[in-house]
Image (cartoon, grey):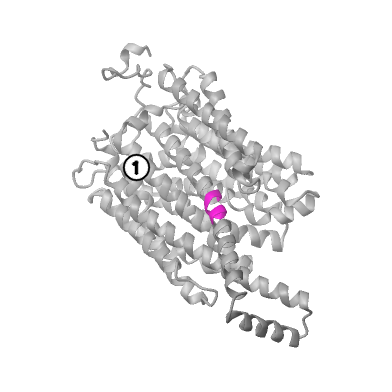
Amino acid sequence: MSATTASAPDEGQAPRPAAPPRAPAFPPLQGGARIAGTLALSLATFMTVLDTSIANVSIPAISGDLGVSPQQGTWVITSFGVANAIAVPLTGWLTQRFGQVRLFTASVLLFVIASWLCGLAPNIESLIAFRVFQGLVSGPMIPLSQTLLLASYPPAKAGMAMALWAMTTMVAPVVGPLLGGWLTDNLSWPWIFYINVPVGLFAAALTWSIYRTRDPGPRKVPVDAIGLGLLVLWVGAMQIMVDKGKELDWFASTEIVVLAVVAVVGFLFFLAWELTDRHPIVDLRLFGRRNFLFGTTALSVAYGVFFGNVVLLPLWLQQWMGYTATWAGIVTAPVGILAIALSPWVGKNVGRMDPRKLATVAFLGFGLVLWMRSWFSTEVTPGVILLPIVLQGAAMAFFFVPLQAIIFSGLKPEQMPAASGLSNFVRITAGAVGTSLFTTLWDHRASMHHAHLVEAISSGARDATTQQVLTQLAAAGQSAEQAGATLNRLIDQQAYTMAVTDVFYLSGLLFVALVALIWMTSPRRTAAGATPADAGGAH
């Protein structure tokens, strides 16, 4: 299509790229076909999201089996994250190039092959290479599962479709460490990859059988080679910086400084190129829409805070509260109860209510949950830990669906894959950044609290209490060195507990502050039964 057929640019703006032709309209699926399609897409989504966290608890086993250090083993996680972050924003361009259904099915099948190869990897180098392959091919799966699911439901039930998609996206990161730990302990680490093979084959076969006649098909679009190269450069540098920053002590490391410079400079060149190229590989002009900009920002920052805390809570339970990986998973598992129970109600009503109000409930709910956690101590019981976890499920139910409704409001069907890919890229990247920043903050606060506690117990009247504890430990048969180590372990436990409650309190404040971003969007009210995705008012 020539540039003259594209919508006219606003005065003073860069020329817009040629608009893609409107995709053929397919009627919604009915009855059993819709149920089967939802199952296939949900399984593929769950499998992909699960793989972002399932390997985390298996790194010690992988490192030991392959004869490398735990630091080298972390590249199993980093390599997947870098490749996935690069591939996700390419979804819109790849969809035009190959077609939605073809691309999704091929991605699932290639993901199965990559998972099988990861399980067979004889050394760390081949495992990292296969994880890069796995991350690249999985990029389009999450955005396209969202797009295909929305197209499977009538507009009146689009909210329900998003609720089903959101449940798999939110629950999978919580299940991942539990399932990964169980498979590693009871079978062996390759099974965290082998488990994808039967699930992926079933999901691919079911998807193709239902959706193969609903693909608008591929079309020839130019390859933005420079844009692709710049994307790989800055996203790769940024992702490696985020993943390795804590390990290398952030900007005290020359490597991290170089990566930061490459990421910033690469991003600036990428931004300038994509906004002026006629056929950009990533449509950054979507951020010119008010709802997309503020909706994506609110969703991504909130997801970064949420995901950082999802990682932090099990770490604290396992490292400082004596929980095993399995028990930490069991304690956190009830988060899905209210999420599953309430998500259908949210999905049913998001088209009739102002999604900003529903999202506000989610953010205030997260704030309340994190405030409750900020009162935890080393004496906290499993029952006290469970209460905010169960309540968090309610906040999760109100989180994804309303924000996605805001983000997609006013978009045309042919813009959906690009918008889904771009918003998911920002969200996933924010999750990685949140995890790194929050674990680093936790360590820094723990060091500060440790220093203060040591100073306090070594001064004045408290010194007698310290000597009494050391005397009791000596009476129990511990040497002076052992008693000192035991006392230091108790101080560390208190310091890391105080630090994690600091992080919980800060996270709660951030969620409350993010409510303001939600209300910077301006969704137009729709008629009863209409999905906000069909409404105008994006600007």
Q: Is residue 205 left or right of residue 358?
A: right
Q: Position of residue 328 (x, y in %)?
A: 58, 67
Q: Mark 1 points at which residue?
A: 295
For this rendering, which residue is in front, 342 or 482? 482
Residue plotted at (56% across, 63% down):
314
The 10 Å Cα crowd at callout 1, few under 14, some 14 to 19, many 20 or more, is: many
Q: Could you tell me the amino acid type at mark 1?
A: Gly
Q: In this view, does 74 lie to the left or right of 313?
A: right
* The image quarter in which residue 6 lies: top left
Q: Which residue lies furthest to the front in this view?
A: 460
Quarter of the image for the C terminus: give it.
top left
Up the image or down, 168 lies above or below 85; here it is below
Magenta span dominant secondary structure? helix
Up the image or down, 9 lies above or below 452; here it is above
Instruction: State which region is magenta.
Output: 436-441
Residue plotted at (37% across, 45% down):
298
Quarter of the image for the N terminus: give it.
top left
Q: Does the magenta stretch include residue 493?
A: no
Q: Position of residue 436 (x, y in %)?
A: 56, 49
Q: How many labels does the image show?
A: 1
